[in-house]
């Protein structure tokens, strides 16, 4: 599903040069649930951004669903991102003036298609994450955990093949965090969506079928969670 070969990312800010990723090579098969761990600054978010087509590597190649994506023109990358990838951010990134349902179907609107169908699908996805009775709420009328579940529902509206989640529970209390992780895990099991998630919390490793570790931009550990 994902083939990463020798990916490096160098950030140059004035005279400061940061090698955030150094020669990362990784294969992820369809249906895996991969947990990415590592200290603060080890390159986890940078890796996810390269894989999510939010950013481009300085060196190396990334294949997603059989297609080399790092060299594609920006328009093609945006289209791919919309069609095949879901991304969940630590801080939800919902639009405050839209209801939960509208937030969920927005990425479907950007692709065109029937309005009634996408509303129905948005409702179905909200139900899937346990929020069927919150469809008309705006983000500020939802708890953090609920907002994050709306963000997960939104990430699924275009039937992605891969879902990326960068510390999706970092802003949540333990109980809401657990609900969010369970929602992700259920999507992986029931819909077969490949999931890559970053976490700092060792307790969240239990959801993974595989665990990888980053250390100073280098992939050091890769295996089945203990
Ligand atoms: N846009 C940027 N410009 C310059 N340097 C950056 C940029 N983004 C990240 N970095 C640097 O790259 C390194 C890796 O950052 P990254 O955000 O990937 O770490 P992380 O593992 O996600 O950390 P955390 O656990 O704190 O979220 C850090 O040293 C950081 O300072
Ligand atoms: Mg990070």
Image (spheres, rainbow, N blue to C red):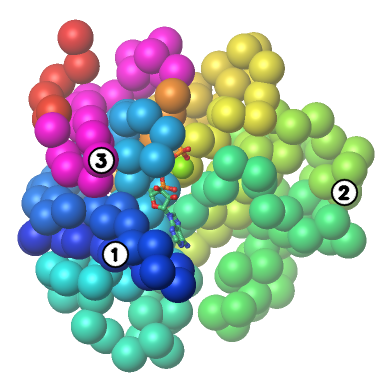
Point 58% across, 41% down: residue: 90
Q: Mark 3: is the Cβ under 8 angstroms from ligand 1?
A: no
Task: Compare residues 154 and 40 and report the one nearer the observer.
Answer: 40
Point 78% across, 50% down: residue: 100
Q: Is residue 4 above or below residue 208?
A: below
- Say which mark, if any, is on residue 10: 1
Circle nearer the N terminus (1, 3): 1
Rounded to the nearest angstrom, the CA distance separating label 2 from label 1 is: 39 Å
- The residue that disc 3 covers is 216
In magenta, the rendered stretch is 201-220
Task: Compare residues 19 and 222 and report the one nearer the observer.
Answer: 19
Mark in front: 2 vs 3 = 3
In the structure shown, which secondary structural element does the residue marked by tag 2 occupy?
Answer: loop
Q: Which image quadrant is residue 7 in?
A: bottom left
Mark in front: 2 vs 1 = 1
Task: Compare residues 139 and 131 and report the one nearer the observer.
Answer: 139
- The residue that disc 2 covers is 138
Query: Residue 16, image x and y in percent?
Result: 39, 63
In the structure shown, which secondary structural element does the residue marked by tag 1 occupy?
Answer: strand
Point 64% across, 37% down: residue: 149
**Quarter of the image with the C terminus in it:** top left
In the structure shown, which secondary structural element does the residue marked by tag 3 occupy?
Answer: loop
Point 41% across, 11% down: residue: 203
Rounded to the nearest angstrom, the CA distance separating label 1 from label 3 is: 12 Å
Left or right placement of residue 88 versus residue 56 in this view: right
Mark 3 burial class by Cα count in 10 Å: few <14, some 14-19, many 20+: some
Left or right placement of residue 54 versus residue 37 in this view: right
Q: Is residue 51 above or below residue 211?
A: below
Query: Residue 24, image x and y in percent?
Result: 14, 51
Q: Which image quadrant is residue 161 in?
A: bottom left
- Say which mark, if any, is on residue 180: none
């Amino acid at each position: 599903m994902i083939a990463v070969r020798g990916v490096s990312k160098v950030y140059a800010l004035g005279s400061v040069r940061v090698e955030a990723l150094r020669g990362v090579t990784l294969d992820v098969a369809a249906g895996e649930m991969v947990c990415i761990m590592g200290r603060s600054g080890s390159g986890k978010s940078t890796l996810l951004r390269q894989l999510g087509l939010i950013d481009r590597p300085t060196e190396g190649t990334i294949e997603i669903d059989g297609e080399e994506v790092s060299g594609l023109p920006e328009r093609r990358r945006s289209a791919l991102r919309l069609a095949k990838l879901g991304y969940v951010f630590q801080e939800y990134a919902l639009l405050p003036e839209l209801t939960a349902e509208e937030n969920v179907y927005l990425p479907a609107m950007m692709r065109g298609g029937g309005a009634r169908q996408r509303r129905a699908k948005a409702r179905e996805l909200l139900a899937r994450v346990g929020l069927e009775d919150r469809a008309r709420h705006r983000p500020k009328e939802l708890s953090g955990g609920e907002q994050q579940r709306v963000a997960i529902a939104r990430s699924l509206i275009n039937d992605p093949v891969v879902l990326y989640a960068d510390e999706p529970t970092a802003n949540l209390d333990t109980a809401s965090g657990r609900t969010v992780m369970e929602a992700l895990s259920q999507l992986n099991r029931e819909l077969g969506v490949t999931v890559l998630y970053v976490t700092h919390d060792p307790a969240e490793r239990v959801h993974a079928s595989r665990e990888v570790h980053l250390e100073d931009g280098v992939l050091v550990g890769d295996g089945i969670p203990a």
